[in-house]
Amino acid sequence: MKAKSVRIFDELILRHPALNECRQAIEDAAQLWLECFRSGRKLLICGNGGSAADAEHMVGELVKGFMSKRPLPVEDRDRIFRVTTDNPSVGGYLADHLQCSFPAISLVSQSAFMTAFHNDVDPELVFAQQVYGYGNPGDIVVGLSTSGNSKNVVYAMKVAQAFGMRTVAFTGKSGGYLKEIVDVCICVPASSTPFIQEYHLPIYHALCMVMEVEEAWRKI
């Protein structure tokens, strides 16, 4: 990683010294995310309650510019101009305003599917069904669970593993069952739900900043 990325993690620990004990897990998660995005894969993100809000928040920082504007590369601008020769002003507007993006999907906001699956099948399998439907080998499923034991998140991780996806969890201190089954578990040093979530936010902000600094939308 670039020196600037390392500084982002240094500053995270400076602001939240207690997170030093899970710094390695945070950096391991960053490495998995970089590999995922650089190979053209995506994140699928899930959680419940406040963690569902965090899933949406995380996607927001990834899909659009976060700390920088992420202008499109020349080759992408050229593609847009080639299909807007009939109206160059439209091409210019698109090319100037679209931003480089990390493919990340929140699994918590698809109300029609979720209510249908709740009603017809099993509410605890909603995320697992989405992972099965959307996921491909090399994708990453990110699950947020303060207890580390949320069944719907656990089931999603099991499906991810079955079909060649990597797994990252954000949990509280104990890690719960997720700690035993995921590739990387970021177990923050807190046991109370609100305090756990207060640690999760600066961590995923740092991860999103690093993806942007590394320009991980560029395929390798």
Image: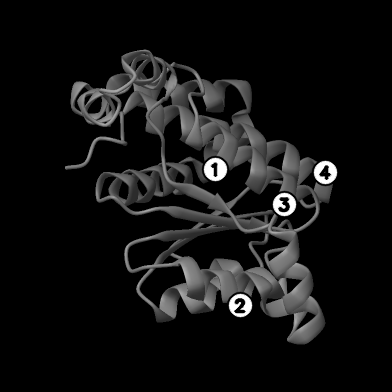
Mark 4 or 1: the one toward you: 4
Q: In which quarter of the image is the N terminus?
A: top left
Q: Can residue 181 be seen in this view?
A: no
Report the amino acid beneath label 3: Ala
Q: Mark 3 points at which residue?
A: 52
In space, the residues marked 4 and 1 are separated at their CA atoms by: 19 Å
- Give me the disc on residue 21: 1
- The residue sitting at 50% across, 78% down in the picture is 159
- Residue 136 is left or right of residue 19, and the answer is left
- The residue sitting at 59% across, 75% down in the picture is 128
> Would you identify the image quadrant in which residue 213 lies?
top left
- Of marks 2 and 3, which one's residue comes earlier in the chain? 3
Query: Which residue occupies the foreground of this view, 89 or 131?
Result: 89
- Of marks 3 and 1, which one's residue comes earlier in the chain? 1
Residue 158 x %, y %: 52, 78
Which type of secondary structure does the marked residue at label 4 adopt? helix
